[in-house]
Amino acid sequence: MNINLTLIGQSITFFIFVFFCMKVVWPPIMHALDERKKRIADGLAAAERGAHEQELAEKRAAEKLHEAKQQASEILAQANKRASEIVDEAKEAATEEGNRLKTAAEAEIEQEVHRAKEELRKQVSAVALAGANKVLKKEVDASTHKAVLDDLIAQI
Amino acid sequence: MASEQELTSTGYIQHHLQNWTFGQHPDGHWGFAHTALEAREMGFMAIHVDSMLWSIVLGLVFFFMFRNVAKKISSDTPSGMQNFVEWIVDFINENVRGSFSGKNDVVAPLALTLFVWIFFMNLMDLIPVDWLPMTAQLIGQYVFGANPHHVYFKVVPSTDPNITFGMAIAVFWLMLYYSIKIKGVGGFFGELAFQPFGKAGLPANLILEGISLISKPVSLALRLFGNMYAGEMIFILIALLYSGGIAWGVLGGFLQLGWAIFHILIITLQAFIFMVLTIVYLDMAHQHH
């Protein structure tokens, strides 16, 4: 338990260790700790920002969805309207076409009837002529009585 | 030669409490002290080789342990040793922030060095008292051919008052240095001379403040030394039981285990107290009164 040079030796050793600790041990460790603290703080801030942004995005998404639904229903309504329009137009066109066809058919029928009447008239006149010919035999000359026969045909 | 002396309890204890000393003999030549008496006769011109050796070795253990981590430290997820080192550094940093109000880059590394270094020195106390001295005796005897009874080897540096006073005086110099640096020579001596009784009570002020100033390093050193010396002494006394037969030996085993467990608290606490008081004293040196 003698007090001796060890005292001074320990003091010097102490200062040397403190010096080296101060120069090469403490600063890098503290630097890393501070940096990590900063990174954690940044990370937390970023997380909060992310959460906020997500909230906004959700809101935006909901808005977009709503808009899209509205647009869809509008388009649907328009489409329905257009469809009924098209159907109406088609009906109209069909009616018109039908009428046109009917008119044409009627005209044709009338023409046909007319032609048949004409034909019939001609045949009737021929039959009448033949009948008259048989009745009158020689008395009646086709060429001399042509005017009478034509008049007869016209009267049928 | 000294075998009879070695067998007595007193001899055993005395042998354990004697440092391995290198110094100047009274006749002028330098050499190792072979007996406690020779060591005492060397006076101030001697050095405790074992104390200094362990002090430096443990200081290096501290330094390289922390330096290795500091070299490859990153702010990514820490692991292993880095966790441990960061935990201690953070703990010290918290303490310094809590107790030290000034701005000084020396205080925190100083506190870290003190805490870990003193803790390591105290930790040597938990190694069974005979292991290292016995090893040293065997090496001394068979490698260097020394008389084993003249091989002294004290392994707990903090049970050597030179070590504790060495650190306390170093802290004391720092206190004086920062007091004068911050407050100036006049401010520092003004604090000593004109407080607490004003100019009229100058002599009383000087005595009071002088004592309180001197008592700081003295109490710092004696507290650590006293605790560790007492703890060491109890380990030595317990170790004596091993020579008393099986029954005493078993009892000694339990006692040693119990005391070692309790001592874990003391060694940590003493390292912590030394560190905290150092921070507080340095803080006082930075403050104007």
Image (cartoon, coloured by chain):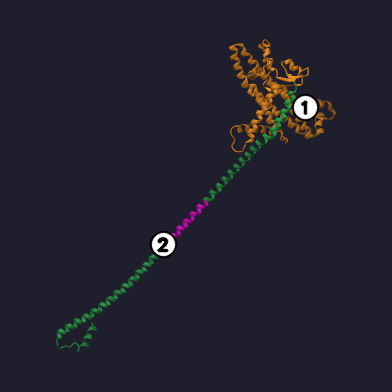
Q: Nearer the viewer, residue B125 or B47?
A: B47
- Residue B99 visible within the image: no
Please, which chain is the residue tagged with disc 2 on? A
**Which chain, by letter, is green?**
A
Which of B130 and A152 lies nearest the eye of the viewer? Answer: B130
Q: Quadrant of the N terminus of chain B?
A: top right
Q: According to the image, label 1 marks what residue?
A: B213
| Quadrant assignment, res B207 | top right
Label 1 CA crowd tier, 10 Å (few <14, some 14–19, many 20+)? some
Image height of B11 relative to B223, above or below: above
Q: Say which residue label 2 marks.
A: A84
Badge 1 sits on which subunit?
A: B
Q: Residue A91: in sight, yes or no?
A: yes
Q: Nearer the viewer, residue B197 or A52?
A: A52
- Circle nearer the viewer, 1 or 2: 1
- How far separated are the C-alphas under marks 1 and 2? 106 Å
**Amino acid beneath label 1:** Leu
When the figure is inspected, residue B90 is found, relative to residue A108, above or below; the finding is: above
Image quadrant where one finds the C terminus of chain B: top right
* Residue A154, quarter of the rendered image: bottom left
Tell me the tag on residue A51.
none
Magenta-drawn segment: A62-82
Which is more toward the observer, B239 or B262?
B239
Tell me which chain appears orange.
Answer: B
* Residue situated furthest right in the rendering: B200
Q: Is residue B210 left or right of residue B118?
A: right
Against A80, residue B128 (above or below) is: above
Q: Is residue B202 left or right of residue B218?
A: right
